[in-house]
Image (cartoon, rainbow, N blue to C red):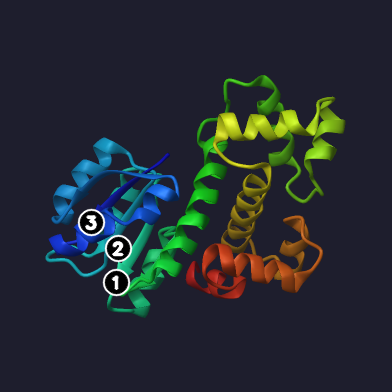
């Protein structure tokens, strides 16, 4: 399960968020929570969760200030800001720091479900990059091949032919060692590569479409928007 930490200065809101059944059903385990952002920073450093859900406006320290402090100390977790106050400058800072998503209260179950699904896919995709090797030599070779050929047209069948194994065996490796499906892993890999290219290069978005393994520009933009909650051009503008 993915490890989640919650920060909100309103105790009732905090308890409501932590007890949402969508978290458990979506594969998330609450490992901690706090109403004080300064204390939260200390706990997050110690607990090292996969994702931090935080309020924006809190006494003495905003959610983005807290995120900046943690990023400065090497925190690699994902951040989701949940706020009743949409603010352009704060949202820009949030995305510059690599924030995952910025939600406006009140958050509906549908919106939360959508975010959890995206988070799950991204976190599953990050695992082989954080931890270069799994305990499966076969899977390590496959992951290396995929990381070096993001633009390729990959499938269970094509991987099976390259590595001389059955598609069902590959599917089992992804499920057992990464806790995800091959399709979800590839989506995460392509979308993170797209985000990197948008942030670190000035390549045209149509070229990035091809480099990330998509032929249809408009389809790529729809997938990117669903995954990152903004268009490719808006993402590039936010991380300038």
Q: Nearer the viewer, residue 119 or 67?
A: 119
The image quadrant that residue 63 belongs to is: bottom left
In primary-sequence order, the first of circles 2 and 3 is 3
Using the image, determine if residue 65 lies above or below residue 45.
Answer: below
Q: CA distance from mark 2 to mark 3?
A: 12 Å
At a point 37% along the width and 79% down the height, the residue shown is 88
Q: Nearer the viewer, residue 23 or 221?
A: 23
User: Can you identify the residue that label 2 sits on?
Assistant: 64
Whole-percent x, y for residue 147 in the image? 68, 40
Whole-percent x, y for residue 125 in the image? 57, 44
Using the image, determine if residue 161 lies above or below residue 20.
Answer: above
At a point 21% along the width and 42% down the height, the residue shown is 43
Q: Nearer the viewer, mark 1 or mark 2?
A: 1
User: Can you identify the residue that label 3 sits on?
Assistant: 7
Q: Is residue 65 visible?
A: yes
Q: Is residue 185 left or right of residue 47?
A: right
User: Can you identify the residue that label 1 sits on?
Assistant: 83
């Amino acid at each position: 399960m993915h490890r989640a930490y919650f920060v909100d200065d309103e105790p009732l809101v905090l308890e409501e968020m932590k007890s949402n059944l969508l978290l458990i059903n979506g594969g998330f385990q609450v490992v901690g929570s706090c109403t004080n952002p300064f204390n939260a920073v200390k706990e997050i450093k110690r607990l090292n969760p996969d994702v931090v859900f935080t309020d924006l406006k809190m006494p003495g320290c905003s959610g983005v200030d807290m995120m900046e402090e943690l990023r400065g100390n090497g925190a690699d977790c994902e951040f989701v800001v949940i706020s009743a106050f949409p603010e352009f400058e704060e949202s820009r800072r949030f995305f510059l720091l690599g924030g995952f998503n910025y939600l406006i209260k009140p958050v509906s179950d549908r919106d939360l479900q959508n975010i959890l699904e995206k988070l799950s896919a991204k976190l599953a995709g990050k695992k082989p990059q954080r931890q270069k090797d799994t305990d499966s030599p076969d899977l390590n070779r496959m992951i290396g091949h995929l990381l070096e050929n993001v633009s390729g047209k990959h499938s269970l069948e094509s991987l099976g032919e390259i590595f001389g194994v059955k598609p069902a065996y590959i599917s089992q490796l992804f499920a057992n060692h990464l806790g995800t499906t091959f399709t979800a892993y590839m989506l995460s890999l392509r979308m993170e590569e797209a985000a990197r290219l948008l942030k670190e290069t000035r390549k045209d978005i149509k070229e990035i479409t091809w480099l990330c393994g998509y032929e249809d520009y408009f389809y790529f933009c729809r997938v990117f928007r669903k995954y990152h909650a903004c268009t490719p051009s808006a993402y590039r503008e936010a991380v300038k």
